[in-house]
DNA sequence: CGCGTTCACTTAACATGTTAAGTATCTCCA
DNA sequence: TGGAGATACTTAACATGTTAAGTGAACGCG
């Protein structure tokens, strides 16, 4: 309470409290944000070496596992919003890392697939990526990691019904 | 150039023989991303009603708990990068939600504090925010939530040492 | 003093997140 | 069959993430 502009007549009063807002810093969104950032900080430098952003890498990985996918399907898989994906695909296509064709049966749909170049790039990055993931797994503990991901999945699930209209998420 | 026939009519073809990688939808970064998104999806609409983004709300919350803070300190607390914070502070100041003064002892530093308007806005949003958080807690379970956050904290901690003390990146 | 260094921010430039609006295509049914 | 509505993207506009460079002030040390 009583938050004042800290009167300008005084000399030094840098630190207000030692325990400012544990409350805020311990909120669930912040915990998730910091944890994810800690993880991504391990990967980003290596991806950057290959001229890839995190999202571009997600897309390539998603495409490498399938023959081809519609844009909407790819968005769901790579967990990207349509507009973001649209832009990224345009750039990846310009770099010849992916290929795009409109479906014959439905001219609205665009089938996206990874190119030879894209596969080559993936092959170059994958080993480092796997090594980093293995390092993280080892540091944190494989069992604990599985446990954590199980809880994250449950959290996601128990919040999904709130805003979802009536979607049936039939995943693996 | 025609990578493969890839008939446009096929619906499911779990090939995935190119580069052997984990199913990336189960990777840790994706799990964290999806979980966080599921949580934030609960908050965003309410914040938006008040013309606030998630980051702006973080800053106001951080400022509400202290008298004033330097920009760098605030960045650390709200978990924002300097440039992002710089922009947001400029906007929040234009909306009279915060106040800024340069420190007397060190002209480089800028002391930021929340304004009366900002406090008023927080008072308007906080109840809804708390209600949403309570709902999440109830759905997921308070004990489980605490457990999850404990694990997230441990994950963050066990990865923190990697980029801080561990070094030898003198290849630049 | 003087000058190079560090520090605290700010700008710049590019990429993505987020919401709303636009465009082309397809579906359905009166 | 043709026109309203739904669908699959794409664009647009604004806000933030991310890295690099810039600016001005404080420091250190000869």
Image (tube, coloured by chain):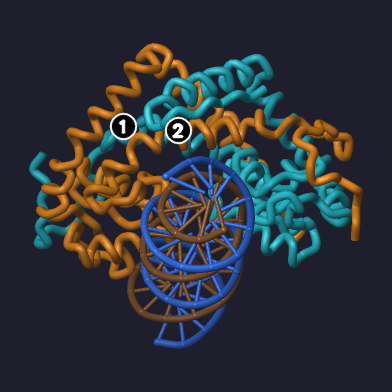
Chain colours: A cyan, B orange, C blue, D brown
Q: Secondary structure at mark 2?
A: helix
Work out whether residue A21 can be spotted. yes
Cα distance between the residues tagged 2 and 1:
23 Å
Q: Secondary structure at mark 1?
A: helix
Classify residue A13 as left or right of residue A145: left
- Circle 2 marks a residue in which chain? B
Count residues near mark 1 (Cα–Cα under 10 Å), then give few for <14, some for 14-19, many for 20+: few
Residue B38 - label = 2
Residue A10 lies, in percent from the top left, at: 12, 58
- Quadrant, the N terminus of chain A: top left
Residue located beneath label 1 in the image: A22
| Nearer to us in this view, A62 or A123 | A62
Classify residue C26 as left or right of residue A6: right
| Nearer to us in this view, B103 or A139 | A139
Please identify the quarter of the rendering in which residue B13 is found.
top right
Q: Closer to the camera: disc 2 or disc 1? A: 2
- Circle 1 marks a residue in which chain? A
Residue B68 lies, in percent from the top left, at: 21, 52
Residue B165 lies, in percent from the top left, at: 62, 42
Residue A121 - label = none
Q: Are the two marked residues, 2 and 1, in contact with CB atoms closer than 8 angstroms?
A: no
């Amino acid at each position: 309470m009583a938050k004042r502009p800290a009167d300008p007549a005084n000399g030094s009063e840098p630190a207000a409290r030692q325990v400012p807002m544990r409350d805020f810093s311990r909120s669930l969104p912040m915990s998730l944000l910091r944890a994810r950032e800690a993880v991504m900080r391990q990967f980003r430098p290596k991806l950057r070496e290959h001229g890839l952003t995190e999202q571009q890498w997600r897309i390539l990985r998603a495409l490498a596992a399938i023959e081809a996918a519609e844009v909407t399907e790819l968005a769901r898989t790579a967990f990207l919003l349509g507009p973001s994906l649209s832009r990224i695909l345009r750039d990846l296509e310009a770099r010849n890392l992916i290929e795009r064709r409109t479906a014959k049966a439905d001219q609205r749909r665009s089938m996206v697939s990874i190119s030879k170049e894209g596969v080559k790039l993936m092959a170059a990055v994958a080993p480092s990526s796997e090594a980093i993931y293995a390092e993280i797994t080892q540091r944190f503990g494989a069992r604990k990691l599985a446990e954590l991901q199980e809880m994250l999945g449950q959290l996601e699930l128990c919040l999904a019904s709130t805003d979802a209209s009536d979607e049936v998420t039939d995943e693996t």
